[in-house]
Amino acid sequence: MPIEVRRFGVGHRRPDGPPGTTGIAGQVIESGSGGIIAELAFERRARITPHTNPNWTYFLVIEGGGWVGVGDERTRVQAGEAVVWPPDVIHAAWTDGAPMRAIVVEFASPPELLASGIIEGTVQAIGPGGVPPKQPSKGEGRLAPRPVTRIQTADPDAEEGEPL
């Protein structure tokens, strides 16, 4: 079977988002009955207008940062953070003085149903002696405190942003 390559990023995006969205371009990477995976690129002062959708949505910030809202909550996000938007809950995302890139993953079914039979597997004996390794346990955790890395200015450098 040949390797399938899906292209996204600069040169592959189109304007994207629900009505009222400004300053955002995106590219669908995969779409099917189970959900969708897409890349979104936010310009400075871009906005996905508040809206709902019927899917579980993961908003994975991969570059830059901005703001997200879920229901009545608002918080700042940056690269390396993910936000969960539950189905049928008003959510939004926007930027102020810096651009942001995100991967959006939407699931038509609740996430706990998707993993059934996919992630579970069997451990096979490897190497001499035929002793299988211990089954990994489910991780527990929380986000680490976020260090302050830069100071926001009222007029960011106009040359700063995503390279072309």
Image (spheres, rainbow, N blue to C red):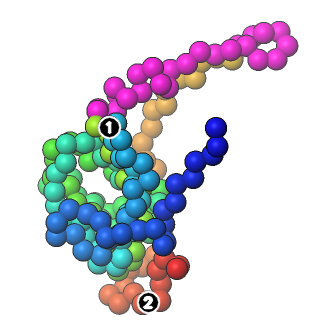
Q: Residue at x 52, y 60 (%)?
A: 7
Callout 1: SS: loop
Residue 56 picture location, percent across and down? 28, 41
Q: Residue 157 carries which label?
A: 2
Q: Where, by quadrant of the figure, is residue 133 drawn?
A: top right
Q: Which residue is drawn at 44% across and 89% down?
A: 157
Distance from label 2 to label 1 (Cα)? 43 Å
The type of residue carrying mark 1 is Ser
Residue 74 picture location, percent across and down? 22, 60
* Viewer can see residue 50: yes
17 left or right, relative to 35: left
The type of residue carrying mark 2 is Asp
Q: Which of marks 2 and 1 is in front?
A: 1
Residue 95 picture location, percent across and down? 31, 72
Magenta segment, which residues? 109-132
Residue 131 or residue 153, whichever sits in front: 131
Q: Residue 33 carries which label?
A: 1
